[in-house]
Image (cartoon, rainbow, N blue to C red):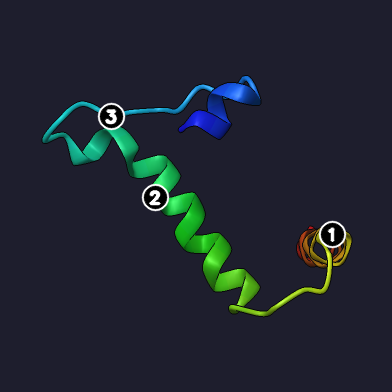
Amino acid sequence: MKQLKEMGIRQSMSRRGSCLDNAPMESFFGHMKDELDYKCYKTYVYLKIHMFFNSSVRK
């Protein structure tokens, strides 16, 4: 959490006992994991390239 504060990023916290608060983000990360198929990328640039071409093919 210290690193988040240093970078100026606010951590989102849902209400206790309310699983529906975080449902959109859980869905997003679940779909992202499915799409990336747990591949390893040498650099962040390779990941961005994969994400760009994957989304442009579906349009």
Amino acid of disc 1? Ser
**How far, Cα to Cα, is label 3 from label 1?**
33 Å
Instruction: Please give left or right for residue 31 compared with residue 22 in the image.
Output: right
- Residue 32 in the image: x percent, y percent? 57, 61
Instruction: Please give left or right for residue 51 compared with residue 11 in the image.
Output: right
- Residue 18 in the image: x percent, y percent? 16, 34
Amino acid of disc 3? Ser
* Towards the viewer: 11 or 27: 11
Task: Give the SS element for disc 3.
Answer: loop
Which dot, 3 or 1, sits closer to the camera?
A: 3
In the displayed structure, 39 sits above or below 14; it is below
- Report the residue marked by disc 2: 26
Task: Give the SS element for disc 1.
Answer: helix
- Report the residue marked by disc 3: 14
- Residue 15 in the image: x percent, y percent? 20, 26
- Which picture quadrant has residue 54? bottom right
Q: Residues within 10 Å of mark 3 (few under 14, many from 20)?
A: few
Which residue: 59% across, 78% down?
A: 38
Mark 2 or 3 closer to N-term?
Answer: 3
Label 2 close to label 3 by CB (< 8 Å): no
- Report the residue marked by disc 1: 56
